[in-house]
Amino acid sequence: MAGSQGKFAEKPAWRDGIRAQFNMINNEKCEQFSRVDVSVQYLLFLILFPLITALFMLAVRRDTERGWIVKLSALAIGVVTALALVTLYDKGVVYFGFDAAPVNLLMFILEMAMAALLLWYAVKYRKSLALCLVLVQTALIVWFELTCSRASDIANPLFCDPFSLIMALIIGIIGSLICVYSLGYMRHFYEHHVEIPNRTNTFFLIIFVFISAMFGLVFSNSLIWVYFFWEVTTLCSFLLIGFTKTEEATNNAFTALWMNVLGGIAFIAALIWLAAQPVPMLGLDQVLTAGKALVLIPAALIGFAGLTKAAQMPFSSWLLGAMVAPTPVSALLHSSTMVKAGVYILVRLAPVYAFTTTGFALSLVGAITFLVASALAISQTNAKRVLAYSTISNLGLVVACAGIGTYEAIWAAVLLIIFHAIAKSLLFLSVGTVEHRIRSREIEDMNGLITRTPRLAAMMVIGIAGMFLAPFGMLISKWAAIQAFISAPLGFVLVIILAFGSAFTVFFWAKWMGKLITVTPDTKNVEGPVDRNEWIALVCLAGLTTVTCFIYPVISKILIEPFLSTYYGSIARLSQDNILIMMMMLFLIVILPLSILLPHRRNRQLPPYMGGVVTSSDMHFTNALGGRTSVTLGNYYLDGWFGEAKLKMAGVYVCGVFIAAMLVTALFGGMAL
């Protein structure tokens, strides 16, 4: 692996302070040492500072104090994330070595505490499946600690590379904006749900722990540390999904728990396998350089864990159930935390999957999930469920790219992660604010929002456009994915699936956007004043959605291409012709708004066309019996073709078969394609 290599300084005592313990590996010059020393402080800040903020939440009692703490913490996290980017973006892979034994011990104690908490919940609510799985996982952790603890001494437990920085930007900026948005949302949430006890402090406490765990996950080179933070995200999502403590929320939280614990069991089994080797390989760098024959089985097990965390079929139901949580939780799970952890680990291990039958089976799981989830989204009328199925489908595409594992595919996968995180967080937060205005999440109730809540509707239109219209990012990413699949072994199968799945996505996004921009007569503006905190987050995310599609070549050049160059020795980018096409679309998107300055003839409003039947401007017509009948406009949802009863189980069974194939082929050596 290219990047920084070098020497360790003498290991100091833990009590001498955190700064003195960390030593840069490649510090031939004192100046370089100083710069990287600062860098590791940024990483530590991002991991530990949200925890400190979470602790403050325990003591805060007044809304004003809570608001300032949350906003200042969000600002600090965002600023330090940007500083880490500026400091480390051109350093390649930088490792940070120190004595990790005390931290390993602390993590083991915390894992036991988390297990005890989950067991208590499982016993309290009589959830036998969750109880059994948590017991099995706990037993494996204890057994690992008793038998493999010597193998857990990783020289470089922390690291940073361009992909870590990309993930840190997603967590730090989008996660922080969601925290700020939550200040306004949670106040309105309790006004609309007076039956739910106010637990705002607990809500923010869990949110900041969640963010801390995600930073720890993406900066950890030690797989033991990755596993620890992985399990923290499982606990946080469980608590947030069940936040309202209703029966539905509790059941859905346990569904999410047992599915993710199943992945956790696979993860700890992979660690045991790696630790049991003659030369233990519990560092992420060791796994990526050990050779596929040695690490394909644990990579498949961790891949299974990634599929559960990324809500791929047959584990997609937990993410749909998570929609009962307050909307900021949904935005956080979908954009910057839970599901992104799943695809992060799969992209990390992509070089191991490349050109193997195991990897191809993994790709088919993602591709089938993309196809089926896109079709299922067509039949959904609830906006949050549409967003949930959309997330599952887009993550399926990332999984398909990770399974292929070529540098072109990983280039597309990283782009998909970036653009999906931004656009999806904007859409969730917009839906949350609109829901408080119109008291509904139903898409049919969003008819004509462009006149009823014009500014919020504009935000939603930008978010939806970001998911499927040129020149916004998701279309660019899918374009790149098609290019990657074409050049991959048996890639034509994936190209066909991608083509049909993309058609489905256009269907459900277009009809939702059509509802928003429909202008109906006699509608009133019901938007009212939008909370300042909510508005700040929405405007920032709308700006990011637009700006990112303009600067994606820069992102690719300074972050994605160096990442690919490090791990693959090659870089990938769109061809020159494709870049020209993209530039033309960008030009069109810039000049299109200017068309409103052109002279127009006077607009005319016409009554709805009903196949020759005369209608009036107030949406009525005279029926065959001479009666006055109201005109109702609605979308097609085609539940008979794309409903959950028709497709969901088929997707579950097919993906289950491919997951079994992935594990079996790994066991037999993952025959090369």
Image (tube, rainbow, N blue to C red):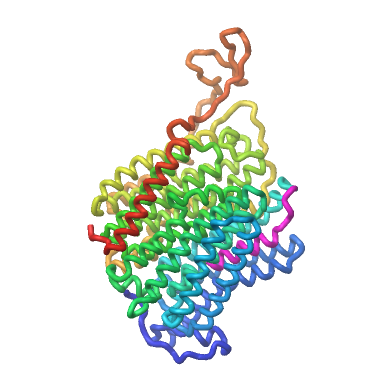
Residue 518: quadrant of the picture: top right
- The chief SS type of the magenta part is helix
| Residue 502 position within the rendered picture, expressed as x and y whole percent measured from the top left | 38, 42
- The residue segment tinted magenta is 195-213
- Where 35 sits versus 474, above or below? below
Residue 197 highlighted magenta (yes or no): yes
Residue 500: quadrant of the picture: top left
Is any atom of residue 92 visible in this view? Answer: no
**Residue at the far top in the pictured view:** 625
Q: Residue at x 60, y 43 (%)?
A: 455
**Closest to the observer: 661 or 26?**
661
- Where 167 sits versus 246, above or below? below
Q: Is residue 511 found left or right of 70 in the rendered image? A: left
| Residue 421 position within the rendered picture, expressed as x and y whole percent measured from the top left | 48, 55
| Residue 229 position within the rendered picture, expressed as x and y whole percent measured from the top left | 51, 68
* Number of dots carrying numbers: 0
Is any atom of residue 231 visible in this view? Answer: yes
| Residue 269 position within the rendered picture, expressed as x and y whole percent measured from the top left | 42, 68
Q: Residue at x 32, y 74 (%)?
A: 1
Quadrant of the snapshot with the C terminus? bottom left
Q: Is residue 569 found left or right of 176 in the rendered image? A: left
**Closest to the observer: 281 or 176?**
281
Residue 75 highlighted magenta (yes or no): no
Q: Is residue 284 found left or right of 462 in the rendered image? A: left
**Closest to the observer: 46 or 54?**
54
Q: Residue at x 28, y 53 (%)?
A: 576
